[in-house]
Amino acid sequence: MKLLIKQGHIIDPANSIDGVHDIYIANGKIVAIGKKPDGFKATKTIDATDQIVIPGIVDLCTRLREPGQEYKGTIASETAAAAAGGITTVCVPPDTDPCIDTTAVAELIHQRATAAANCHVVTQAALTLGLDGEFLSEMATLKTQAHCVGVSNGLKPVENILVMRRAMEYAASCDMTVFLHAEDPGLSNNGCAHEGVMSTRLGLPAIPESAETAAVSRDLMLIEQTGVRAHFSHISSANALQMIAQAKQQGLPVSVDVSIHHLHLTDLDIGFFDSNCHVIPPLRSQRDKQGLQQGVKQNSIDALCSDHQPHCADAKLAPFSATEPGISGLETLLPLSLRLVDENILDLKALIQKLTVEPAKILGIDAGHLSVNTTADICIYNPATNWTVNAENFVSTGHNTPFADWELQGKVTHTLLDGKIVYQS
């Protein structure tokens, strides 16, 4: 199949392309941008006039719920939701059931993702066996045989600092990135909301900012000692981000992302116990939100992610502290990110960079760009389309979103994977 994307405004930060051009695709690859190749005859044409054409979005944290929690979502359903959001690559944390501490589990996920053929799926291997924080996993085997892009302990902190040091040393010897969820379990103490006026007023168990900053401080010291390449996932506080930014300036091999909901919501949005605002790490203060937005603007934050966690309706119907944390975020990642441009926090090219090539670099994969002779993973969206978020219309099985009834601008019209249209509105 030969495909022509006609007269779209291409924004590809990796190749410094920002202008209206045609894209020519054959055999799943981009064969030319701009000038028509000799003898090229398109079998299908997409008219992208007045639309934006960008590399397929790369999401650093997407829970597909399979294996183990198929009643909340499956690899087929959630990768279809990713395609609807213009996302062509997702990274799955290791906290599936069973967790990704054997090659068999990773291979199962890859096989089912290949069968679904909605988007590329890469996996993180478990840092410790069973994510129990006691014994190290077979990282080298999981990298070479299961092609895991990094190691993580999911949302379970490794409490024993010696185990964490050994894990980082092993990961460094395998040249694997350690993905870190910064949380001190003693300080978080099973809390569910940011420690502040709102948690006090509502009587909710609180998680202080120090639960994150203490964990970041510990991990940065271990990173400096071991030399491991590390990535801090979904940082939520301004102080923690400042610590990481200083470490980057000092030359430590660290990177950081923030989930898109932490750039738009605060603990005040919990209101009268809105369980859709129950997330881990919790929604922080207005000061933290502004600090994170400033971090995006100043390039202290490398990437934006959805931190997608679909739930069934029952998971959000209990009292706030007893509900399950998480937001179904794949289909709102792009339009919520575009809102940062409307609010003059960063320009469009910088935003696209944080959604495409930068997360691809963190994962160490060849994605997030529109280079000639590379796989045609492409997102096309209409920047002028205004729409209202209605969770019932989500492709994802999970309808848990705090952004219901929000007016957003920018809607994906086409998503291409390996040169094939996998989503069309």
Image (cartoon, rainbow, N blue to C red):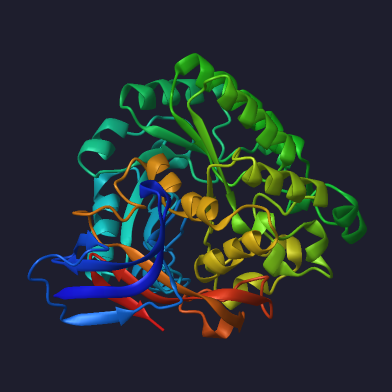
Q: Position of residue 185 (x, y in %)?
A: 66, 38
Residue 407 is at least partly visible in this image: yes
Q: Position of residue 401 (x, y in %)?
A: 63, 71
Which residue in the rendered view is the most extreme toward the left? Answer: 39
Q: Nearer the viewer, residue 110 or 27?
A: 27
Residue 325 in sight:
no
Tell me if residue 396 comes above or below residue 277 in the rendering.
below
In screen coordinates, is 354 left or right of 10? right
Q: Is residue 13 above or below residue 298?
A: below
Q: Nearer the viewer, residue 242 or 311?
A: 242
| Quarter assignment of residue 8 | bottom left
Q: Is residue 366 left or right of residue 381?
A: left
**Hey, which quadrant is residue 348 in on the image?**
bottom right
Q: Nearer the viewer, residue 29 or 202?
A: 29
Where residue 186 sits, quadrant-wise, is: top right
Left or right of 114 in this view: 99? right
Direction from residue 106 to residue 409 in the image, left or right:
right
Q: Residue at x 30, y 26 (%)?
A: 174
> Horizontal and vertical percent for residue 218?
62, 24
Q: At 62% across and 52% down in the image, what residue appears?
A: 346
In the displayed structure, 77 sits above or below 102; it is below
Residue 346, above or below 318: above
Please state which of residues 355 and 380 is positioned toward the viewer in this rendering. Answer: 380
Residue occupying the point 31% across, 45% down: 365
Figure quadrant of the C terminus: bottom left
Marker count (numbered): 0
Q: Residue at x 38, y 47 (%)?
A: 14
Quadrant into which the N terminus falls: bottom left
